[in-house]
Image (cartoon, helix red, strand yellow):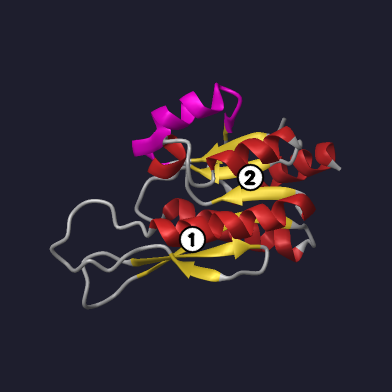
Amino acid sequence: MQFAYVSLPGRGANDRFLAVIAARLRAQGLRLAGTVQTNIERSDRVRCDMDVLVLPDGPVLRISEDRGNLARGCRLDADALERAVVGTAAALPHAQFMIVNKFGKQEADGRGLAPLIAEALSRDIPVLLGVNGLNLASFETFSSGMAVQLQPDEAAVMDWCKIAIAEYV
């Protein structure tokens, strides 16, 4: 089983890093499933808009709700996340590799993309995902220690991907 994660400091760092990795894997002709996120800064808002690209080819879905500058708490649009899950489920049977931008609160609660991560692993499809510090303990419980933390170095992660794919094929 090939299961790994990255955890970069800084808002949006995992998202930017995994988007680069996904683009490089796609350029190599790899069939992907999963999601990568783009954070769009807005001059009229304190917080950014969050869009995910459902791999391999879309759609792009806005997964954040604009609740105004004074709103607190979760801004996740659960319906949009569910549409991303449906799109990922459709791509998974044809995938050679899965990337998930974030193991977040939904995944920590067993929802979101968590079931599809487990399904990919059960099919021996390599999985790479982003985990932030807030969800690391939940991820460690979910992964049962089977995931390896990769250094946030593009070349090292691409090397891991290459090895994981070679073992899958």
Quarter-of-image position of residue 159: top right
Residue 72 part of the magenta-drawn span? no
Is residue 83 placed above or below 14 in the rendered structure?
below
Q: Which range is magenta?
A: 132-148
Quarter-of-image position of residue 57: bottom right
Residue 147 is situated, as x and y percent measured from the top left of the image, at: 59, 29
Residue 74 is situated, as x and y percent measured from the top left of the image, at: 28, 52
Disc 2: CA contacts within 10 A as few (<14), some (14-19) or many (>=20): some
The single residue placed furthest to the bottom in the displayed view is: 43
The C terminus appears in which quarter of the rendering?
Answer: top right
Q: What is the distance, in whole Å, between disc 2 and disc 1 at their CAs? A: 18 Å
- Label 2 or label 1, whichever lies nearer to me, is 1
**Could you tell me which residue is drawn at 18 percent across and 55 percent down?**
72
Residue 147 part of the magenta-drawn span? yes
Q: Main secondary structure of the magenta part?
A: helix
Looking at this view, is 113 or 43 the one in front?
A: 113
Looking at this view, is 117 or 133 the one in front?
A: 117
Looking at this view, is 23 or 101 the one in front?
A: 101
Is residue 152 placed above or below 89 in the rendered structure?
above
Quarter-of-image position of residue 5: top right
> What's the mark number on residue 37?
1
All told, the count of numbered labels is 2
The single residue placed furthest to the right in the displayed view is: 169
**Could you tell me which residue is drawn at 78 percent across and 61 percent down?**
28
Residue at mark 2: 157
> What's the mark number on residue 130?
none
Residue 73 visible in the picture: yes
Is residue 155 placed above or below 134 in the rendered structure?
below
**Could you tell me which residue is drawn at 76 percent across and 51 percent down?**
93
Looking at this view, is 149 or 72 the one in front?
A: 72
The single residue placed furthest to the top in the displayed view is: 144
Q: Residue flagged by tag 1: what amino acid is it? A: Gln
